[in-house]
Amino acid sequence: QVELVESGGGLVQTGDSLRLSCAAAGDTFNLAAMGWGCQPPGKEREFVATLHWTGGSTVYTNSVRRRFTISKDNAKNTLYLHMTDLKSADSAVYYCAAGRDEGSFYGTAAMDFWGKGTLVTVSS
């Protein structure tokens, strides 16, 4: 079992930056990938980005590429999402996810574990 706890959400203005953190605990030794998904108000959860836990490769959805950066700190078992040039369309609950299967690197739909989320609100 893997426990994920997100933090760092909040209310910001258009163009601001924000860094989300996800602390992972439990059986993290054999994870294949971790990532972020988001659920905008009234919509389904969407894929944002993934990071291969051992190789370090990353994948981003088109709308956040060149604005968001996913990274990790192995020593702290922590995943980050650095968000820049935030837009009102980025407002959502952001969820951290982790997966044991290599397929989870290609999309958060294949993830095994999810956090409870952290709310990001971008005000124009």
Image (cartoon, helix red, strand yellow):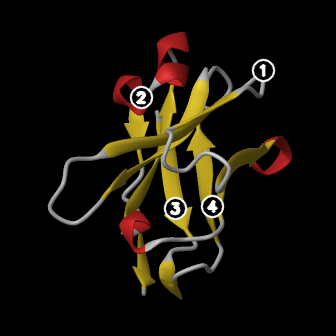
What residue did someone put label 2 on?
A: 111
Disc 2 crowd rating (10 Å Cα; few below 14, some 14-19, many 20+) is: many
Disc 1 crowd rating (10 Å Cα; few below 14, some 14-19, many 20+) is: few
Q: Give the mark nearer the N terminus: 2 vs 1.
A: 1
Q: Give the mark nearer the N terminus: 4 vs 2.
A: 4
What residue did someone put label 4 on?
A: 21
Indicate which disc residue 84 carries. Answer: none
Q: Which amino acid does label 3 sit on?
A: Glu
Q: What element carries label 3?
A: strand
Q: Give the mark nearer the N terminus: 1 vs 3.
A: 3
What residue did someone put label 1 on?
A: 55
Residue shown at 54% from the left, 40% from the top: 49
Q: Distance between the residues labelled 4 and 2?
A: 18 Å
Q: How far apart are marks 1 and 4 (CA)?
A: 20 Å
Q: Which amino acid does label 4 sit on?
A: Ser
Q: Which amino acid does label 2 sit on?
A: Met
Q: Please provide percent x and percent y for residue 65.
A: 61, 45
Q: What residue type is labelled 1?
A: Gly
Q: Give the mark nearer the N terminus: 3 vs 4.
A: 3
